[in-house]
Image: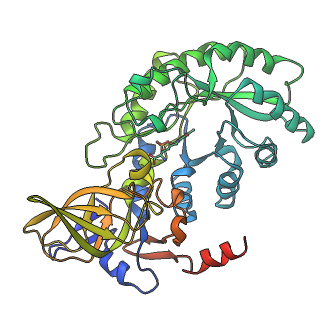
Amino acid sequence: MALTRRADGTLELGGVSLADLARDARIGTPAYVYDLDAIGAQARELQRAFEGAPHLVAYAVKANGAAHVVRTLLAEGCGADVVSGAELSLALRCGAAPDDIVFSGVAKTNAELDVAIGAGPRGIGAIQVESVEEISRIAARARAARKTVRISLRMNPGVDAQELDTHDYIATGHDGAKFGVPISSLSDALALLESAEVSPALSLAGIGAHVGSQFTTTDAYAASARVVFELARDVRKRFALAFVDAGGGFGIDYGAGCAASPPDFVRAARALQKEAGVADLALYCEPGRSLVGPFGVLLAQVIQKKESRKADAVRRWLMIDAGMNDLLRPALYQARHRIAALTDRGGERRAYRVVGPVCESSDDFGTHDLPAADFDLVALLDAGAYGYVMASTYNGRALPAEVFLRGGAIAHVNARAEADAWVEDRLRA
Ligand code: LLP
């Protein structure tokens, strides 16, 4: 367990006292803290679930693009799933092999495609095509570069929206979503890929789908994988496929439980791969959240308390110095992150409504039972994924600091932006 409570009531991550970090003059609050050892261990556990079968764990860089995190996962044999030219450049500069990178996205610009095409002798591992319309555009860029470039078809398997048991904003594999090639367009896509216009500039290497995020059971993932693998069985009669890609979406336990572990998703996909008769193809998956989410926290300082009374009811607010600009998930998806006092010796509890300093009512982290005794520092848990990457400078706030822990010590500190950096930037506008 990356996060532990010492006998004296202090909270530590990766063997380091979080209160010491918050009080360190180089760090302060708000600050994200990540346990790189736990991230590496999580990747190793996932790799083992493939039992030596050909595969690629393409880490979804969007979840956390810090170089220390990306390099930790590359060192465990992961590749990268990227969704922009910038994420692609980051993965390459962190040392990812071009062959181990897949590039998804519904609206890739020509400039972004050129980075992917230019990356290796045959471009990156696969540009994931999300529409028939995109195919001719990629082919033209590949021809201009005089290369044969590998692509894969990211399908929209049209899984029933009800079955995509997650927040609407992160369900992508239903037929009302902008993502993926609809199954009804597959035959057009294949015909185009066989045409003189496109072949040999593009070679079809894989077929896959990503239907959503934060799945707490394997049901929706398996429903999508079944469709994809059955399509692969037919498509490979015409194209020399190298892989099938079941996507990411493995959920984590934010406190309400998560029945399926990351290896469960892999095992479910492998079983279906065998059933569909495509177990000889490499199995790709694209996890983001599950590799990093549980191993990061956001530290914040209590600025002050506030009480408001209505009749007999007392409302207790806890105002902290981290807001929705630092961790957007609660405001955007009504997500709940557990909150812990950095020093907690047990004893009487009190329910606090924890809120940030931003001038929006949605800057609200929910009601949490915290010590009735005074405390000055808290951690918002499970903030390693989709935290810093979604942070903004709204309300003139500086981006938070980041601390990377390895071997029970600080490996690196990414200091908070200077308080007046925002002012200077806006003065230039
Ligand atoms: N592959 C593709 C093509 C994706 O679009 C995503 C996530 C992933 C893989 C990784 O999914 P994961 O394993 O992390 O669930 N900001 C939201 C999550 C958005 C996910 C977008 N796509 C959140 O904070 O919950």
Q: Is residue 182 above or below residue 137?
A: above
For residue 370, which quarter of the picture?
Answer: bottom left
Looking at the figure, which quarter contains the N terminus? bottom left
- Can you see residue 141? yes
Q: Nearer the viewer, residue 304 or 50?
A: 304
Q: Is residue 46 above or below residue 352?
A: above
Residue at the spot x=81%, y=34% of the render?
A: 138
In this figure, which colouring scheme has been used for the structure? rainbow
Q: Residue at x 38, y 39 (%)?
A: 263
Q: Is residue 90 left or right of residue 299?
A: right
Toward the bottom, the furthest residue is 25
Using the rendered view, name the quadrant where residue 351 is placed. bottom left
Q: Position of residue 363 (x, y in %)?
A: 39, 58
Please indicate whether residue 279 sits to the left or right of residue 134 in the image.
left
Q: Give residue 233's position: percent from left, percent from top.
A: 59, 15
- In the displayed structure image, the side of residue 308 where residue 20 appears, left or right: right
From the viewer's side, name the closer residue of 32 and 3: 32
User: Disc count in the image?
Assistant: 0
Q: Quadrant of residue 14?
A: bottom left
Q: Give x and y (percent) for residue 396.
A: 54, 71
Looking at the figure, which quarter contains the C terminus? bottom right
x and y percent of residue 25 in the render? 43, 87
Q: Residue furthest front?
A: 311
Left or right of residue 105, residue 7 in this image? left
Q: Nearer the viewer, residue 301 or 262?
A: 301
Residue appearing at x 34%, y 57% in the figure = 364
Nearest the viewer among 139 and 93 is: 139
